[in-house]
Image: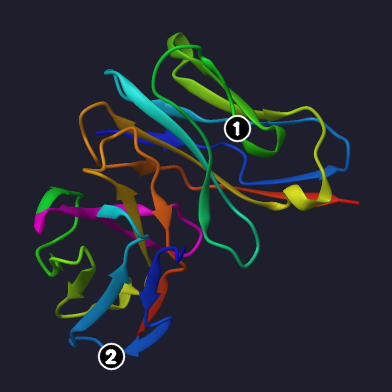
Amino acid sequence: AQSVSQHNHHVILSEAASLELGCNYSYGGTVNLFWYVQYPGQHLQLLLKYFSGDPLVKGIKGFEAEFIKSKFSFNLRKPSVQWSDTAEYFCAVNDKGYQKVTFGTGTKLQVIP
Amino acid sequence: DAGVTQSPTHLIKTRGQQVTLRCSPKSGHDTVSWYQQALGQGPQFIFQYYEEEERQRGNFPDRFSGHQFPNYSSELNVNALLLGDSALYLCASSPVAGGPTETQYFGPGTRLLVL
């Protein structure tokens, strides 16, 4: 069965600091990978996704993630965070050909002005 | 363009009761997935509906059942409620057959409390 690990449960950064949130998955097959974000009081929304091609994926609001197959990782990065990036971030995976999406437990990011 | 809508927003039930939650997908979407999000956890996949049939199911007991209507809206039914069913129930829709690479659009959720 698939599982997704997000090791950082709560991250606090100052504005302009760089961000990297870890995500590892366990599944031996070919996968699609996602990062979702939930801003305070808002719905879950897609930040970026990878399903093939360039392993460095760019998403909305300056976020990017790199798929490293050998490490089963899909870490999320942003060079300079803003206060408006305060949110909960979820990594998710599904295997190609299947609809079921497995989410990690989420990382709460707090950006201090 | 209306996004995914869910009703009701909050619900309180007692153990043993049954509950029905409703979801209307985003305009143009024909695939609906349901998730359970317990406090402090990520969403867990319950099942997905496409063409009025359950296409895939997660690790949830038969007490959890669903339905999709011809207009693509969907219901989630939970029978014989347990305290552990207390959670936020999320509906997500995706466009045209909802393949594995499609983006899912989430609704605001229904918060269910079982006493």
User: Would residue B48 be counted in the magenta stretch?
Assistant: yes
**Label 2 chain ID:** B
**Label 1 chain ID:** A
Residue A14 locus on image (x, y percent): 88, 43
Residue B24 locus on image (x, y percent): 31, 69
Foreground residue among A92 and A5:
A92
Residue at horizontal 78%, vertical 27%? A79
What is the magenta segment's predominant secondary structure? Answer: strand
Q: Can residue A51 be seen in this view?
A: yes
Foreground residue among A80 and B36:
A80
User: Would residue A83 be counted in the magenta stretch?
Assistant: no
Q: What element carries label 1?
A: loop
Q: Is residue A5 left or right of residue A62?
A: left
Residue A59's mark?
1
Residue at numbered disc 2: B14
Q: Between marks 2 and 1, how big is the CA–CA gap?
A: 43 Å
Between circles 2 and 1, the one closer to the viewer is 1
Q: Share a chain, discs 2 and 1?
A: no
Foreground residue among A1 and A79:
A79
- Name the amino acid type tagged 2: Thr
Q: In which quarter of the image is residue B17?
A: bottom left
How many numbered badges does the structure rendering display?
A: 2
Neighbourhood count class around disc 2 (C-alpha, 10 Å): few under 14, some 14–19, many 20 upward: some
Q: Is residue B115 visible?
A: no
Indicate whether A56 appears above or below A92. Answer: above
Picture quarter with the C terminus of chain B? bottom left
- Name the amino acid type tagged 1: Gly
Neighbourhood count class around disc 1 (C-alpha, 10 Å): few under 14, some 14–19, many 20 upward: some
Residue A37 locus on image (x, y percent): 57, 48
Q: Give the range drawn in magenta.
A: B31-53
Residue at horizontal 35%, vertical 35%? A3
